[in-house]
Amino acid sequence: MSGAAVRLIFLGGIAEVGKNLFLLETERDIIIVDCGLGFPEEDQLGIDLVLPDISYLRERRAKIRAIFITHGHEDHIGGLAYLWPDLRAPIYATRLTAGLIEVKLKEAKLLDQAEIRVFEPDERPRIEAGDFTVEPFRVCHSIPDSVGFGITTPAGLIVHTSDFKFDPTPVDGKQTDFELLGQFGDRGVKLLVSDCVHVEATGTTPSERVVGETYDQVFAAAPGRIIIATFASLIARVQQIIDTAARYDRRVVTLGRSLENNVRVATELGYLQDPNGVLISPRAAKDLDDNRLVYIVTGSQGEPMAVLSRIANRDHREVTVGEGDTVIVSATPIPGNETSVFRIINQLFRSGAEVIYSARALVHVSGHASQDELVRMIELTRPEEIIPTHGEHRHLALYTDLAVAAGIPRERIHTVEIGDVLEIDEAGVRIREQLDVGYVYVEGVTIGTVTDEILRDRKALANDGMVMIVVNVDRETGLVMTGPDVVTRGFSMHRNGTDLTPELCDHVASMLEAHAGTQDSGDWSYLGREIRETAASWLYARTRRRPMILPMVLEI
């Protein structure tokens, strides 16, 4: 890497939705943008969260100068509580985002160690971090105090949009800083790193305020309790619920630890306004009639342990749902979560509740730019080259077509993968190499102990079950003393009314008899491999299934 060259590496958040983290690197310095987490896919059984693999950063920790955070959503800040001990750099964020980060670091017992530096984007600060100068600019999103970054590097100016849309009437009244974006364009933008996850939508994304109009209609007609599921960090949505509840003389209860923490922080910092005192505790709600209550709950993505799922399954201690209740799922399912979300919606309907979701009414609008806004961002910044990010492969491809139509040469639009090492210099942007980057899984309180091999085993067990074959052999001769015995879990040995167990036992016994006495050493551990291979091929021939085979050879 030459002296004026800069490396750009995505460790998450590209060709996927979630766990956003990328870094910029020179010979001397590294800065990190965002440190998020992702949620497991359906085949990642037993996994609670997915983190970026920061092995590359861990090896270069002495070069890390700062971590810059764009906004307070989980996929941008959720990884800090797990990964910051390996990074140990100052964290730069807006006031609300810093408050939400503090909650997470306090829970992880890291707050006393971390240095959080708050900036005010309207003051247009220029933050020096080694070879980089970072200029935050305000953007509209579905959470207040969201920013993008203009980053001056030795190779030129890079503009990172973060998650954005051009909302003309944001709930907090603070619009995108178009003036600063235009100034970036005048200065010359080497590279635009643009949000693209909503590129499939034509035109412009509706304002957050239109959701408030839908709430007004629902609140006017609902005969009993109203239960609204939304993202824990969607503070603008919470404000709309508080405002609507006040107009209809209802009181609001928040349920879900992350939601309760976020609402408390946003209220203390002045980002949530409750002038009529509609927010109350669950205890106080017990004294009110159903038609005066609104519950805001977590679980809009079908998370099995979140409040909405527990309400739907009738195992929540505060709330049960039934006729007269109205449930609003105020979110669109993240790709991969559709099955879980609609399973909960079906359960709620079955309980007798009226359920309103995105297919029935405008109860959610995206926080991301549609096609016209994406083009306008290109027109404002006038970049030499572009990298679309925060989208899956189809979003990257569709954004490329959109940018070409907007006048950017196709060869200057780069579709990259996690781990690609891009080098930026006066000649342009190129992929130099590919890092071996994986995923880090969080399971309960453990981090990084679950491997891809373990997940493959879990998937095999879930699909085909397990067959355990137990034999006792003579330590000296290898002759079978007892067994084979067959134990199954999740796999049926019955086919067409016939139990295959005796036949399998005979087949394995014949193999063992043929091997008895063939080793002089008395080491019969190799028999486990022979049992596994013999049983697997025999079972597949009979059943066309491949259960996991667990041989147990006990020497006596």
Image (cartoon, rainbow, N blue to C red):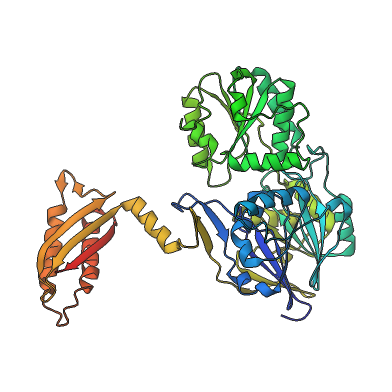
Q: Residue furthest front?
A: 112
Task: Please tell me whether residue 545 is drawn above or below residue 171 in the rendered image.
Answer: below
Q: Which residue lies at the image location 19% right of the left edge and 77% below the top edge?
A: 523
Q: Is residue 479 visible?
A: yes
> Does residue 501 appear left or right of residue 19 in this picture?
left
In the depicted view, which residue is nearer to us: 528 or 406?
Answer: 528
Q: Is residue 330 above or below residue 194?
A: above
Q: Is residue 507 left or right of residue 464?
A: left
Q: Residue at x 89, y 58 (%)?
A: 183
Up the image or down, 80 lies above or below 237; here it is below
Residue 307 lies, in percent from the top left, at 54, 36
Residue that appears at 75% across and 31% down? 274
Using the rendered view, name the quadrant where residue 552 is placed: bottom left
Q: Where, quadrant-wise, is the N terminus in this rendering?
A: bottom right
Q: Which part of the image, by quadrant, shows the C terminus?
A: bottom left
Does the image show residue 234? no
Count all numbered tags in the image, as a single digit.
0
- Find residue 398 and report its horizontal and vertical position in percent: 66, 53
Residue 269 horizontal/vertical position (percent): 77, 43
